[in-house]
Image (cartoon, grey):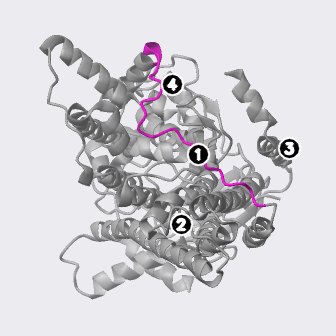
């Protein structure tokens, strides 16, 4: 049984793969946290779609780009009551009708995270309003 | 271009879900009130075109520079590699050893203790699905075990270590024990044993795998534990009936699409677990497959389903859906089905036509391969004819289909790496509270998965390395097989030109998918 493992370890392919993996893990674990002022992003929901100066149009839904490690504040304004859910980070935000609310999170994980409306008014909904793209620094 | 798509998508989506109240899969369970008040049956109802059946992928699209680097490396290395084969003297010797244990060999049967454990886990999971919490798939151990640990995780084990599923597959174990028990009490077999009719081939596995792909990618309630448990029981029952008639090993091998799929991936793996030996990466793919068109079709279905999993989240597919729905709407067919059903029909059409397309392209490539190889024979009078004569395109398909598998494996690994690492963690709280009853058996029930477990750069770079490496492996295997088939090195080299073009195109498809932003609705 052990001779399998030993022969596998001798294979140059396995050794190369192990080396590459080790290097990449090293690269990936460089700390990326950064303290500083929160990044404030203004967003407006009108007729169930989002607009704002920082919103890029993307396929399907708009995109806001932030950088990993930043503290983010999404300042919402909405023309109707909405319950929003930022996936991955799992932040829930409720905006009252014609009111405002803020979603706060620290962008510690990179990725593309949808913000989905789980409710509009008093109806349940499942609509991706916007994607938050957290890019590595 | 996207502006109009987006507006259309919004239009089509805004009317959605007014009645389809579906339990949303919350990971952290913040909406206790909502969850408690939402009846189970709603989750089983139509939910419209939603995200992945389970969890969500948060991968960032590959950045442009990395995509270009990957594409460049693919093309450049292809030519470098082929040039290496073309140099006389450096050509690797034909490896004529059949490097894969025959798929239908019974291999080593698991120790009865292991077998018992596998059956116990299987029964436990199904019972958890039937009787555990139904409100949220992440409070029941069955969906995570099936869709993440088994389907995604075991594919990794199969491709990188060996055919573990052959040992731990509970269905033939139960079939064998069941048959033995019946013999004990009734003194005869349940039904007379018969050989599997030749025309059946592997078509049952092909059909089952298409259905499975549909359940994974389109069936919205596949993550509802009870539905999943019923689906597992239905599939197992069909398999057990076949086992009773045709024999446990033979039927599992030929009709169980999961045995076939994991075995196909494991042929790339360095360990041949059935023969208990180390053979090195990719060696198992040098042997062709047997079983004619149905066996080739199975591989094409598997490759297509793996690819469709990525394609359906691309903006291109979204615009296809929106376009098709618009035609449906403006054409006045609305009375036929609801928008949700129409959308799912579009998805289903995509899922079922991609394997046909893959098969057609592969058949064409093999036809061209036969032509280029024979052209070499005609133009170069010095070349001896192949000992095996001129293989037919179907022979070539059976010999060369495994060579495409490394590309599929590389794509699969790249596509699911982050997903597995993030959502795979959800098994940690679930082992402490498998039924969602609020238990805390091992003290891990409160564990929260860490979404920052992998860096984006790490994920990007490993994906591209995996894809380029898979491509090189595929070319190497293709060339080795060509040497076995066509014997004469120059003829083998020329035969691989169509295959090389196909492989580059297939690898580019993988890179293209990874460079697309994930859009889900």
Q: Mark 2 or 1 closer to N-term? A: 1
Residue B521 appears in the picture as rendered: no
Question: Residue B235 location, x and y as percent?
Answer: 28, 41
Q: CA distance from mark 1 to mark 3?
A: 33 Å
Image mark 1: chain: B
Where is residue A131, by image quadrant? bottom right
Residue A64's quadrant in the figure?
bottom right
Query: Residue under circle 1?
Result: B284
- Do badges 2 and 3 share one subunit? no
Magenta stretch, main secondary structure, is loop
The residue located at (86%, 54%) in the rendering is A36
C-alpha distance separating marks 2 and 1 = 37 Å
- For mark 3, name the chain: A
* Residue B175 visible in the current orientation: yes
The residue that mark 4 highlights is B431
x and y percent of residue B179 in the render?
Answer: 24, 22
Q: How many marks?
A: 4
**Are circles 1 and 3 on residues that touch, CB within 8 Å?**
no
Mark on residue A26?
3
State left or right for residue B68 relative to residue B387.
right
Query: Residue B519's mark?
Result: 2
Q: Chain of mark 4?
A: B
Mark 4 closeness class: few <14, some 14–19, many ≥20 residues within 10 Å: some
> Which residue range is magenta in the image?
B91-114
């Amino acid at each position: 049984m052990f001779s399998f493992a030993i022969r596998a370890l001798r294979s140059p392919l396995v050794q190369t793969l192990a080396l590459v993996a080790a290097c990449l893990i090293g690269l990936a674990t460089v700390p990326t946290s950064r303290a500083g002022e929160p990044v404030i992003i203004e967003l407006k929901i009108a007729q169930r779609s989002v607009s704002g100066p920082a919103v890029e149009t993307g396929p399907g839904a708009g995109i806001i780009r932030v950088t990993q490690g930043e503290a983010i504040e999404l300042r919402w304004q909405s023309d109707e009551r909405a319950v929003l859910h930022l996936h991955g980070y799992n932040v829930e935000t409720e905006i009252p009708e014609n009111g405002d609310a803020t979603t706060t999170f620290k962008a510690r994980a990179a990725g593309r995270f949808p913000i989905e409306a789980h409710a509009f008014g008093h109806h349940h909904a499942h609509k991706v309003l916007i994607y938050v793209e957290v890019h590595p620094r | 271009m996207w502006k109009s798509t987006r507006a259309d998508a919004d239009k089509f989506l805004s009317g959605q879900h007014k009645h389809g109240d579906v339990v949303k899969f919350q990971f952290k369970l913040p909406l206790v009130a909502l969850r408690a008040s939402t009846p189970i049956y709603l989750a089983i109802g139509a939910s419209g075109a939603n995200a992945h059946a389970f969890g969500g992928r948060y991968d960032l699209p590959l950045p442009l520079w990395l995509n270009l680097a990957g594409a460049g490396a693919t093309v450049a290395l292809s030519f470098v590699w082929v040039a290496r084969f073309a140099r006389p003297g450096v050509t690797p010797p034909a490896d004529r050893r059949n490097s894969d244990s025959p798929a239908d060999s019974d291999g080593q049967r698991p120790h009865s203790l292991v077998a018992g454990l596998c059956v116990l886990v299987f029964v436990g999971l199904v019972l958890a699905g039937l009787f555990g919490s139904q409100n949220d798939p992440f409070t029941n151990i069955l969906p995570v075990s099936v869709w993440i640990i088994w389907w995604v995780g075991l594919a990794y084990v199969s491709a990188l270590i060996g055919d573990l599923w052959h040992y731990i597959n509970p269905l033939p174990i139960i079939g064998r024990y069941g048959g033995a028990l019946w013999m004990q009490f009734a003194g005869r077999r349940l039904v007379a044993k018969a050989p599997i009719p030749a025309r059946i081939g592997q078509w049952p596995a092909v059909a089952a795998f298409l259905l499975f792909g549909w359940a994974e990618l389109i069936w919205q309630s596949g993550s509802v534990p009870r539905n999943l448990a019923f689906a597992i029981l239905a599939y197992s029952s069909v398999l057990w009936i076949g086992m009773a008639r045709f024999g446990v090993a033979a039927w599992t091998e030929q009709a169980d699409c999961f045995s076939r799929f994991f075995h196909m991936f494991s042929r790339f793996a360095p360990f041949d677990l059935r023969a208990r030996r180390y053979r090195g990466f990719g060696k198992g793919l040098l042997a062709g497959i047997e079983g004619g068109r149905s066996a080739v079709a199975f591989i094409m279905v598997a490759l297509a389903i793996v690819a469709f999993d990525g394609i359906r989240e691309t903006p291109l597919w979204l615009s296809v859906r929106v376009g098709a729905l618009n035609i449906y709407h403006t054409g006045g067919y609305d009375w036929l089905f609801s928008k949700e059903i129409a959308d799912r029909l579009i998805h289903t059409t995509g899922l079922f036509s991609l394997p046909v397309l893959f098969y057609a392209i592969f058949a064409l490539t093999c036809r061209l391969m036969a032509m280029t190889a024979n052209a070499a024979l005609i133009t170069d009078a010095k070349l001896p004819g192949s000992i095996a004569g001129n293989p037919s395109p179907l022979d070539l398909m059976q010999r060369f289909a495994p060579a495409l598998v490394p590309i599929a494996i590389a794509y699969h690994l790249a596509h699911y790496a982050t997903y597995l690492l993030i959502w795979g963690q959800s098994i940690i709280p679930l082992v402490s509270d498998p039924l969602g009853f609020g238990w805390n058996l091992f003290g891990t029930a409160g564990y929260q998965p860490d979404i920052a477990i992998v860096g984006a750069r790490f994920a990007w770079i490993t994906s591209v390395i995996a894809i380029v490496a898979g491509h090189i492996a595929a070319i190497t295997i293709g060339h080795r097989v060509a040497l076995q088939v066509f014997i004469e090195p120059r003829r083998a080299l020329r035969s691989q030109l169509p295959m090389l073009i196909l492989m580059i195109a297939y690898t580019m498809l993988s890179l293209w998918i990874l460079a697309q932003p994930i859009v889900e609705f």
